[in-house]
Image (cartoon, coloured by chain):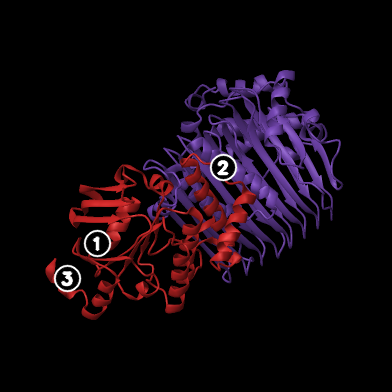
Chain colours: A red, B purple
Amino acid sequence: MALLEVKDLKVRVEEREILHGLSLTVNEGEVHAIMGPNGSGKSTLSHVIAGKPGYEVTDGQILFKGEDLLEMDPEERAAKGVFLAFQYPVEIPGVATMTFLRTALNAQRKARGESEYSTPDFLKKVREVSKSLNIPQDMLKRGVNVGFSGGEKKRNEVLQMALFEPALCILDEMDSGLDIDALRIAADGVNALRTPKRAMVVITHYQRLLNYIIPDFVHVMSRGRVVKSGDKQLALELEESGYAQFEEAA
Amino acid sequence: MNVAVAKTGSGRAVSDLFASAEGRLPGSPAVVAVRRQAFDTYERLGLPHRRIEEWKYTDLRALVGEVLPLAGSPDTAALSRAMEAVKAHAFAGACKLVLVDGVFAADLSDAKALPSGVSVTTLREVLEKSADLLTTASTDAVISLNAAMATDGVVLSISDGAQPSAPVQIIHVATAPSASAFTRSQVRIGKGARATIIESFVAAGAGAYQVSDAVLLSIGDDADVAYIRLMDDAPDAVNITSQFVTVGANVKLNYFNMTSGGAVSRLQGFITFTGEGSELSLNGVNLLKKTEHGDLTLLVDHAVPNCMSRETFRAVIDDRGHSVFQGRIIVRPDAQKTDGKMMTRALLLSDEAEADNKPELEIFADDVSCGHGATAGALDDNLLFYLKARGLPEKQAQALLIQAFVGEAIEQIADDDLREHVIGIAERWLERRS
């Protein structure tokens, strides 16, 4: 069984159809890149998979481990192992990063019927994980993402990924707002989390990110559909020729 | 005892309130005369209503209607219920002074083991000698009624330079349903003293009761004081409290109120600077649900130069709750270099929630820095989605954001344990909500 199966997905936002019958299959351990120009529907796809309100699915389905994802609330999807790394992680003043991480991790564990972490066990785990990702402890003492640079915000997303151990990671425009050094650090963090079981969907406008996170498959999206799929060579071709050919094709 | 009726001609019902209680009210003959006069004032004015500007948003005639008869003295069963409530609501390590249904309960209090520098007597005792504590400058109807009816209270004094080893916690416990308790306390903080005073209002099984409290708080020069009031009365109770605060020179005061109970409540604080160089941090949190009505009215009188006041108010309003914040800052002609600011924010959790903010600046000096700001809004959907996408169910995600919202006022409490105590009360409110 595929880990994620998106079948003929049609999605509307305020009467306008954004996805016009999109299909995508992701198996365990695979890394898929989804590329495409602005407005092609890449972020819409990531939002619909995570369960963001405001999107109306008019047709098609999304199965995760064979279960209907669209029937689940966002928190159920998270507990099942879907993780969306946000393009723009929000700042939450007044909520300490540690409180947030512990509350979220324990909420997911509780939903899965697992025992919740005690505070000492949790602290130990966070220290291990943040150390392996080179995340300074003082970052954890601040409010969630408050005053973080673009790079720090993305590293905080990677930290959560490492902590929650999801089966599927969707990285939405991870490279946006990052300089090359910050990008490399974030990508290194992601690569460290690649396992034979864990799948990743890397959404990006530019080929650049794929120099660091090497995909198994590359899909080109245009105007709400996947118009071409291939291996990592496809990304390099796009870098040469641009998206214009696909805009016409779609 | 319907006051609205009294207003239209039948004064007898209101007089009954006083007449039936008079025999039980402590005090010398001089005190009796002061009480009578105060009651006359109340009888003339009746409960405040919306046509009185200061009470425009809190119309007690509409919200409360009648003043309930005076609660009887608590019996053994009531005291034992009260003891359980005291255990549940005491701040760990605090020196407790307990008032049950408006009567000082020595057996539930730590009055025999006071920290060094702390002395305590009761209003009841003081009234045998003097009526001074019943007189205040204000002739507000609720303050007059409190003067007429006050049965007891704590008269607390922290001596000059004292730094008591433990905070003092005054705990008001209601055990009598459908009755009123009238209390009046005095807290005097000596020069250079450093003290934390906590005041808690809780119920021990009682419902639909009414609390009328008054506090006369005076703070000597160079003192450093935290005054933390936690009103967590029963959901159908009424609590009307008036506080008169005078602040000496070079004082640091952190004044905090949290309202997490009561069907109808108002805290009106009248704060006056009497010495230069003082800094006030005035913070309030209202947590309201169902049809609860919570009012915080603060009047800060910058009567002298070179003082600073900061007001931070946060209201969380669910269902058809109604929060009122009235903040008035007066800067007298001589009070140059005054720095007075207030910021109030309301979080509306339902379409029917209501927040009224009335900031008023009356500035008569020309070299001052004063300002105010107010916002009202719902929880941010983007923040909620982020938390849900990380596995938090809706209510838990909301709770985290609400805690962060009120945290901006609570974090002004310097003591870690006390801050946690206050956060714990807010958390219990959030649990009751979901």
Chain letter of the residue carrying label 2: B
Residue for badge 3: A246
Q: Position of residue B374 (x, y in %)?
A: 46, 56
Q: Residues within 10 Å of mark 2 (few under 14, many from 20)?
A: some
Q: Position of residue A110 (x, y in %)?
A: 50, 41
Question: Mark 2 and 3 residues: CB-CB less than 8 Å, in contact?
Answer: no
Seen in the picture, residue B156 relative to A6 is either above or below; the reply is above
Amino acid identity at mark 2: Glu
Seen in the picture, residue B191 relative to B138 is either above or below; the reply is below
Instruction: Please determine if labels 2 and 3 lie on a single subunit.
Output: no
Which mark is on residue A41?
1
Q: Relative to the observer, which residue lies in front, B137 or B404?
A: B404
A54 left or right of B280 in image = left
Place residue A183 in its image quadrant: bottom left
- Identify the mark nearer the N-term, 1 or 3: 1
| CA–CA distance in space, label 1 to label 3 | 14 Å
* Disc 2, SS: helix
Residue plotted at (59% across, 40% down): B140
Q: Quadrant of the N terminus of chain B?
A: top right
**Residue A45 seen in the figure:** yes
Chain letter of the residue carrying label 3: A
Which mark is on residue B427?
2
| CA–CA distance in space, label 2 to label 3 | 54 Å
